[in-house]
Amino acid sequence: MRDEFERFRTAAVELGVPVEPVRYPAGTRTAADAAAAVGCDVGQIVKSLIFATPTKLVLALTSGANQVDIDRLGELEGEEISLADPDAVRTATGFAIGGTPPFGHLAPLPTWIDEDLLAYETVWAAAGTPDSCFPIVPPRLVAATGATPADFVQRQERDHMGRWLVENMPSGLDLELPDRSEPDRPVPYLGGN
Ligand code: 5CA
């Protein structure tokens, strides 16, 4: 793991984007873990998600508060698209799922960035390992990745209990929701019984 941490830091320097990654012994494998470790809003965590079309791999930098709308991402690409498998992620980026950084990959990937990330002053992304993150200002993240800002996340409403309104669920939701290590956002207590 140390190797990947150093490899990412070196790759960032070589790209002209020096970063100051921090190790968190408690772990940062999921967006929720990372937010708890850093002490920031889960929305400030950058999920570096790799997707595959029949012709290429693409990177979707997604706020930790959001889930990708796979149909919308496919529309943006103009191709069928699905989550890349773990081997493809490692082969393309040089890093494993859970530690995949947003840049410093073996070769740059075409990249989209969730517009919601741009609203934060600082966001935190994985630094090559599932126990590290680094802070970056969104304009610098956009410049480092060449990302195109877009709206490709699920915008469906939840009810007052935080449950998805099922009739509005998009197809493709199953690709992102089964990972129960990424809990739903806490639902404020609204009173009543
Ligand atoms: N370190 C954290 C916060 S930066 C992190 O890397 N989060 S992440 O969201 O970018 O990486 C975990 C993501 O990997 C999951 O959201 C999920 O989309 C993807 N993933 C998890 N398991 C698999 C799998 N078996 N195949 C493909 N993708 C997976």
Image: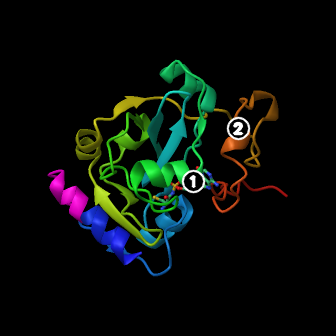
Magenta span contains residue 125: no
- Quadrant where the C terminus lies? bottom right
CB at disc 1 and ligand 1 closer than 8 Å: yes
On screen, 171 above or below 175?
Answer: above
Q: Position of residue 190 (x, y in %)?
A: 71, 53
User: Nearest the camera: 67 or 192?
Assistant: 67
Identify the residue at horizontal 54%, vertical 67% (top origin): 33
User: Nearest the camera: 156 or 109?
Assistant: 109
Q: Position of residue 21 (x, y in %)?
A: 29, 68
Quick one: label 1 or label 2, which is nearer the N terminus? 1
Task: For mark 2, give the secondary structure.
Answer: helix
Magenta segment, which residues?
A: 10-19
Task: For mark 1, give the secondary structure.
Answer: helix
- Residue 73 in view, yes or no: yes
Identify the residue at horizontal 48%, vertical 64% (top origin): 35
Q: Which mark is residue 86?
A: 1
Identify the residue at horizontal 57%, vertical 43% (top origin): 84
Q: Position of residue 50 (x, y in %)?
A: 50, 44
- Quadrant where the N terminus lies? bottom left
Other-residue count near label 1 (Cα within 10 Å), few / some / many at <14 / 14–19 / ≥20: few
Label 2 sits on residue: 173
- Residue 47 in view, yes or no: no
Residue type at tag 2: Leu
Other-residue count near label 2 (Cα within 10 Å), few / some / many at <14 / 14–19 / ≥20: some
Q: Quadrant of ligand 1?
A: bottom right
Residue type at tag 1: Pro
Relative side of 119 to 80, left or right: left
Location of residue 52 by image quarter: top right
User: Nearest the camera: 49 or 93?
Assistant: 93
